[in-house]
Amino acid sequence: MKIAVLSGKGGTGKTLVSVNLAAAAKEAVYIDCDVEEPNGHLFFEPKPIGAEQIAIKIPVVDENLCNGCRKCVEFCKFNALAYINNKLLVFDEVCHSCGGCMLFCPEKALAEKEKMIGQVQYGISENVTVVTGILNTGEASGIPIIKNLLNYAKKEQAITFIDCPPGSACIVMESIKDADYCILVAEPTLFGVHNLNMVYELVNLFDKPYGVVLNKCLEGENPAEKFCTEKGIRILAKIPFDKELGKLNSNALISVRECEKYKDLFTSLLQTVTEEVQHEAVVNP
Amino acid sequence: MKQLLILSGKGGTGKTTLAGAFIKLAKAKAYADCDVDAPNLHLVMKQSVKPKRTDYYGMPKAVIHAEQCIQCDLCRQNCRFEAINVNHEYKVDSYSCEGCGVCETICPVNAIALKPAVAGELMLYTDETIFSTAQLKMGSGTSGMLVTEVKKQMNLVTKDAELAIIDGSPGIGCPVIASLSGVDLVLIVAEPSISGISDMERIIKTAEQFESRIAVCINKYDTNIVNTEKIELFCKKMNLPVAGRIPFDSNAVKAINNGLSIIDIDCTSGRATREVFANTVEFLFSKS
């Protein structure tokens, strides 16, 4: 069972929800797909059991073979190649690793080398296997790392929580493609609603079953709750705005492991989500 | 024209709230929202005019013409993005396709062509002020290119503005890197949590790699004083100026939900923001 936790907006509590749900389960896997700013490992402080370097392929030119025909330069849609002063230049940062330049070079003057862009770390924290993708700073795209993480998720049998990056761009889509269920985390502001609407459209586009967790709930009107009621969206849980929870969270402590009240809240949320997924499996096999 | 970019690494630390307040305090003639994945600045900067809308074309997408396809499988074998699926006939998954053109070139019977594809929409409001923003289409890539377009659009029509304020996106990847180019100062809105500190360190490292000038401010500082002091110590060690502290303030949520900026109402966060703004402007216009 794979559960993706997402929110259009950043800072609504994706990591809070996915970390605590994993901690509340008997046995679970937590996968941090927010490779630009991974935070789950700060909470779990997992005992490392392995790491894998993630590389992309970048072309290299053999200057003895290159005759300056510029076929590769003309082909490259990303402008990652230029022929200047009788020399072929490769701009690593904009290369998408499509392999076209190498494939279509009539002189076979191009080969590929590996360029490290980040890593995937594996660790154990009590009942949770923690898998973290980390993009090196200065690198433009974490998608190859996310693909690696999701391949790992595919093989996993235990209940798996996928902590997604913010937004609704390609990287979020990659993260939810294989999910059985999506949890949308929203905060009670107009910003929150605007961005909830985006991920709401995204999960509908991919026809994923989903429910909403309302976080940081204050007294009075909650625009996010109003949105859910209007659209007929299932509200899975409401997490109150609470100084104690805020403090635990800002010190990267796992509330479920520190406080009975939150253990009950997240255990009950986990139960609700599990029932939703099982229900879904019966209705939409 | 000086350009101030507001970033944070972590999401939800208060970039847009601060950007909205700064725009009003500076009476900025030009501003932009570079968070094209989840733009929000337009929600606090209400416009009385309609924007000029332009379709944004990202990378083209491959299309296979089934009647010409001889099912040789070469396109599928050579696609690095696993964008070509076979199910009776060969089809391109347009979400996975990055428009590289390998399939188009390798097809022996010319059954594949790259077609332009709309990947988002640019909006430009030109009233007394210039406001440039955009929305990326759901599930699209190439957000970095759209960020560049948002800034280009603002710069093209802006004349004699002293200061432009740019709201950035969370993270450290392509949209953030694209937003860094050409700015005079990056203000990082940090949050005093362990996650916030980790994310702040990563965005500072990224901004330094692109040789940007950096200042830091701490939002919701009183939610964790110990971590606030850690951030200030870190900045001191890194020789980065701190523009100030802003307290947690439930009035901020109320202001936003009423479509107001925190400086429109009398509240603690609004007052602190005025001071942060004054310091930031001083850093921005100082020489080194």
Image (cartoon, helix red, strand yellow):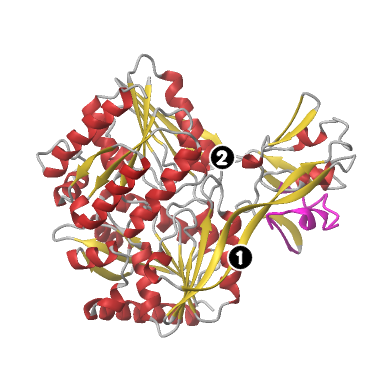
Residue at 40 percent across and 58 percent down: it is A200
Q: Which label lies toward us, 1 or 2?
A: 1
- Is B256 on the left or on the right of B118, as rendered? left
Q: Which residue bears the numbered disc 2?
A: B118
Kindly tell me whether residue B30 is visible in this rendering.
no
Q: Nearer the viewer, residue B13 or B217?
A: B217
x%, y% of residue B251? Answer: 14, 48
x%, y% of residue A156? Answer: 56, 77
Magenta includes B74?
Answer: yes
x%, y% of residue A118? Answer: 57, 56
Q: Which residue bears the numbered disc 1?
A: A52
Specify few, some or many for label 1: CA neighbours under 10 Å numbering under 14, 14-19, or 20 or more: few
The local secondary structure at tag 2 comes to: strand
Kindly check if marks 1 and 2 are in contact, taking CB atoms under 8 A apart as contact.
Answer: no
B282 vs B240: above or below: above
Cα distance in 3D space between marks 1 and 2: 36 Å
- Is B95 on the left or on the right of B110, as rendered? left
At label 1, the amino acid type is Glu
Badge 1: chain ID: A
User: Which contiguous range is marked in magenta?
Assistant: B63-87
Q: How many marks?
A: 2
